[in-house]
Amino acid sequence: MKTQILVLVQDMMLEAERNNDSVRANILLDVHQAILKKFENESVPVPSEEQEEPTMPKCSCGGNFEFNRYCGADVCPACDNHKGFARCFCGWAESGGDGRAELEEMGETIEPEDY
Ligand SMILES: [Zn+2]
Ligand SMILES: [Zn+2]
């Protein structure tokens, strides 16, 4: 489909050139480039970050983060590190302290159901 349009425009371009119709040829060249640009935009290579999305980034300890439903965070099973978190209501804290108590100090309301 895409290439068909390009071939068609290319044919019209060549025909216009053959007829020494430079105005038409220039317009068609613009059209051709616009189509090419559009296709390029459509098939923009996915940035590497997005391509690697299925693979979790590794923890600094070398462990693989796994999404923890309970914490709502990516948690390293090896060292309990929470990716992008400083503390968590599961009790973990980056500082090594009590994450839950730290959150409570910060005014986070922790529902009893979360126990
Ligand atoms: Zn947690
Ligand atoms: Zn880790």
Image: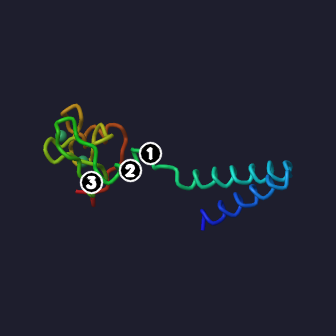
Mark 1 and mark 3: Cα distance apart in space: 22 Å
For ligand 1, tell me if the residue under mark 3 lies within 8 Å. no
Q: Amino acid at mark 1?
A: Pro
Tell me the tag on residue 67. Answer: 3
Give the residue displayed 74% in from the left and 54% down from the top: 31
Asked whether disc 2 touches disc 1, contact meaning CB atoms under 8 Å apart, the reply is yes
In the rendered image, residue 35, in percent from the top left (x then y), is placed at 67, 55
What residue does disc 1 label? 47
Foreground disc of the pair 1, 3: 1
In the rendered image, the residue lying farthest to the left is: 78
Residue closest to the eye, 24 or 102: 24
Res. 100 image quadrant: top left
Mark 1, other Cα within 10 Å: few <14 / some 14–19 / many ≥20: few
First in sequence: mark 3 vs mark 2:
2
Give the residue displayed 68% in from the left and 49% down from the top: 33
Quadrant for the C terminus, please. bottom left
What residue does disc 2 label? 51
